[in-house]
Image (spheres, rainbow, N blue to C red):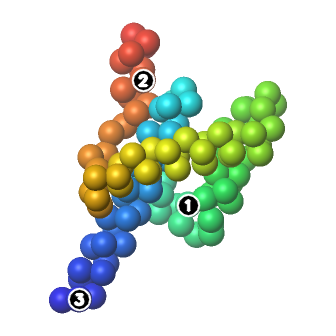
Amino acid sequence: MLKVALNQYADDAADLHRNAYNAAFYELGLSWYWDANTDDDLTVITGGRNRLQHYLNTCQAHLLKVYEADFLIEAIQAAKARCYETMTASGTRVTRSVNWAEFQRGEVGV
Protein backbone atom coordinates (compact mmCIF):
# COMPACT_ATOMS: atom_id res chain seq x y z
CA MET A 1 0.00 0.00 0.00
CA LEU A 2 2.82 2.40 0.89
CA LYS A 3 4.61 1.55 -2.36
CA VAL A 4 1.46 2.40 -4.36
CA ALA A 5 1.12 5.71 -2.51
CA LEU A 6 4.79 6.56 -3.15
CA ASN A 7 4.45 5.70 -6.84
CA GLN A 8 1.36 7.92 -7.10
CA TYR A 9 3.20 10.75 -5.37
CA ALA A 10 6.11 10.39 -7.82
CA ASP A 11 3.67 10.39 -10.76
CA ASP A 12 1.93 13.49 -9.36
CA ALA A 13 5.28 15.24 -8.92
CA ALA A 14 6.31 14.40 -12.49
CA ASP A 15 2.97 15.69 -13.79
CA LEU A 16 3.37 18.89 -11.80
CA HIS A 17 6.85 19.52 -13.20
CA ARG A 18 5.69 18.76 -16.75
CA ASN A 19 2.72 21.10 -16.35
CA ALA A 20 5.05 23.81 -15.02
CA TYR A 21 7.26 23.40 -18.10
CA ASN A 22 4.20 23.61 -20.37
CA ALA A 23 3.05 26.77 -18.59
CA ALA A 24 6.55 28.24 -18.97
CA PHE A 25 6.57 27.45 -22.69
CA TYR A 26 3.24 29.26 -23.00
CA GLU A 27 4.47 32.21 -20.94
CA LEU A 28 7.48 32.57 -23.24
CA GLY A 29 5.40 32.31 -26.41
CA LEU A 30 6.78 28.89 -27.39
CA SER A 31 4.18 26.63 -28.98
CA TRP A 32 5.66 23.54 -27.36
CA TYR A 33 3.74 20.96 -25.41
CA TRP A 34 5.26 18.11 -23.44
CA ASP A 35 2.71 15.34 -23.02
CA ALA A 36 3.26 12.22 -20.90
CA ASN A 37 4.89 10.40 -23.84
CA THR A 38 7.36 13.23 -24.44
CA ASP A 39 8.10 13.28 -20.73
CA ASP A 40 8.68 9.52 -20.73
CA ASP A 41 11.09 9.87 -23.66
CA LEU A 42 13.01 12.61 -21.85
CA THR A 43 13.29 10.80 -18.51
CA VAL A 44 16.31 8.87 -19.77
CA ILE A 45 18.14 12.22 -19.68
CA THR A 46 19.06 13.44 -16.21
CA GLY A 47 18.38 17.03 -15.20
CA GLY A 48 16.06 19.70 -16.52
CA ARG A 49 18.79 21.67 -18.30
CA ASN A 50 20.02 18.53 -20.08
CA ARG A 51 16.47 17.58 -21.10
CA LEU A 52 15.88 21.05 -22.51
CA GLN A 53 19.19 20.96 -24.36
CA HIS A 54 18.31 17.57 -25.87
CA TYR A 55 14.80 18.76 -26.81
CA LEU A 56 16.21 21.90 -28.44
CA ASN A 57 18.79 19.90 -30.38
CA THR A 58 16.38 17.22 -31.58
CA CYS A 59 13.00 18.96 -31.92
CA GLN A 60 13.61 22.71 -32.09
CA ALA A 61 17.02 23.00 -33.75
CA HIS A 62 15.80 25.86 -35.95
CA LEU A 63 15.69 28.10 -32.86
CA LEU A 64 19.40 27.55 -32.32
CA LYS A 65 20.06 29.49 -35.53
CA VAL A 66 18.64 32.59 -33.85
CA TYR A 67 19.11 32.05 -30.10
CA GLU A 68 21.91 30.67 -27.99
CA ALA A 69 20.88 27.46 -26.25
CA ASP A 70 21.98 28.76 -22.84
CA PHE A 71 19.78 31.85 -23.25
CA LEU A 72 16.71 29.77 -24.11
CA ILE A 73 17.35 27.24 -21.36
CA GLU A 74 17.84 29.95 -18.72
CA ALA A 75 14.64 31.71 -19.78
CA ILE A 76 12.65 28.47 -19.73
CA GLN A 77 14.09 27.34 -16.40
CA ALA A 78 13.32 30.72 -14.77
CA ALA A 79 9.75 30.72 -16.11
CA LYS A 80 9.28 27.08 -15.09
CA ALA A 81 10.45 27.85 -11.55
CA ARG A 82 7.93 30.71 -11.29
CA CYS A 83 5.13 28.54 -12.67
CA TYR A 84 6.03 25.63 -10.39
CA GLU A 85 6.10 27.92 -7.35
CA THR A 86 2.69 29.32 -8.25
CA MET A 87 1.27 25.85 -8.76
CA THR A 88 2.58 24.57 -5.44
CA ALA A 89 1.97 27.71 -3.35
CA SER A 90 -1.43 26.45 -2.29
CA GLY A 91 -0.04 23.06 -1.33
CA THR A 92 -1.57 21.38 -4.36
CA ARG A 93 0.34 18.34 -5.60
CA VAL A 94 -1.47 17.96 -8.90
CA THR A 95 -2.59 20.54 -11.42
CA ARG A 96 -4.88 20.22 -14.38
CA SER A 97 -2.97 19.47 -17.57
CA VAL A 98 -3.45 22.17 -20.18
CA ASN A 99 -2.11 21.95 -23.70
CA TRP A 100 -0.85 25.53 -23.81
CA ALA A 101 0.26 25.15 -27.43
CA GLU A 102 -3.34 24.47 -28.49
CA PHE A 103 -4.59 27.22 -26.22
CA GLN A 104 -2.12 29.66 -27.76
CA ARG A 105 -3.20 28.79 -31.30
CA GLY A 106 -6.76 29.67 -30.34
CA GLU A 107 -5.61 33.05 -29.05
CA VAL A 108 -4.02 34.02 -32.34
CA GLY A 109 -6.80 32.53 -34.43
CA VAL A 110 -4.71 29.92 -36.23
> Closer to the camera: disc 1 or disc 3?
3
User: Residue tagged by mark 1?
Assistant: 42
CB of mark 2 within 8 Å of CB of mark 3?
A: no
Q: Amino acid under label 1?
A: Leu
Q: Amino acid under label 2?
A: Gln
How far apart are labels 2 and 1 at the CA level?
24 Å
CB of mark 2 within 8 Å of CB of mark 1?
A: no
Q: Secondary structure at mark 2?
A: helix
Q: Which numbered disc, 2 or 3, marks the residue that appears first in the sequence? A: 3
Most foreground residue, 9 or 46: 9
Q: Secondary structure at mark 1?
A: helix
Q: Where residue 18 appears, x then y in whole percent?
A: 44, 53
Q: Is residue 14 left or right of residue 46?
A: left
Which residue is at a point 27% across and 57% down the rendered structure image?
92
User: Residue tagged by mark 3?
Assistant: 2
User: How many marks can you see?
Assistant: 3
Above or below, comparing residue 30 to residue 4 in the picture: above
